[in-house]
Image: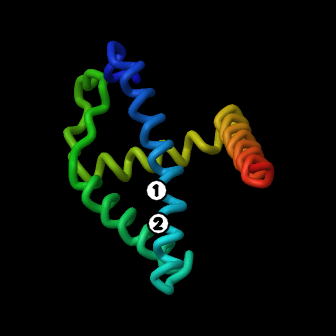
Amino acid sequence: MDRQPDHKKQNVAKWTFADAAGAIVGPLALGAAIEMGSGWRTLYTLTATQSTATLAIAARFPFPSGRAKAPGEGTEQGPARFVDGLRKAIAASKQGSVLRWLALLELANSMLDVLFGFVALTS
């Protein structure tokens, strides 16, 4: 959002579409895997493998930070910047306010999953 302040609505629409696509494609993929004689474990393994490959490819590309470099700041690229970002994310996850929001996010997500379960029962 900070990198493209003029495109906030478009980015939110993209995220919403990706979420909806995942909610549709996930059950369809599971149904297809079961129909072919596999189960959720095979699908989970394939998804984990694909995600790991995507992460490995993404780690090779430099990600712009959206801010100007400070004088004397390093010019590290690719994996070094990625690892630095992971370290910062882990450090941020130790802050109380971040943990609170992560917990609230998971509770909201769980509540939504439960509501979807009730919708399936009432249909």
Q: Residue at x 73, y 53 (%)?
A: 120
**Is residue 54 or residue 112 the one in the foreground?**
112
**29 on left or right of 68:** right
8 shown above or below 120: above
15 shown above or below 70: below
73 shown above or below 30: above
**Is residue 120 or residue 73 the one in the foreground?**
120
Residue 18 in picture, x, y percent from top left: 43, 42
Residue 57 in picture, x, y percent from top left: 25, 59
Q: Residue at x 26, y 32 (%)?
A: 73
Question: How many other residues sit within 10 Å of disc 1, few (<14), some (14-19) or many (≥20)?
Answer: few
Q: Secondary structure at mark 2?
A: helix
**Amino acid type assigned to the residue bearing label 1 in the image:** Val
Residue 110 in picture, x, y percent from top left: 73, 48
Q: Which mark is residue 25?
A: 1
Q: Name the residue carrying label 2.
A: 29
Disc 2 + disc 1, Cβ < 8 Å: yes
**55 on left or right of 117:** left
Specify how the rendered protein is coloured: rainbow
Marks 2 and 1, how far apart at CA = 6 Å
60 shown above or below 3: below
Q: Residue at x 69, y 32 (%)?
A: 97
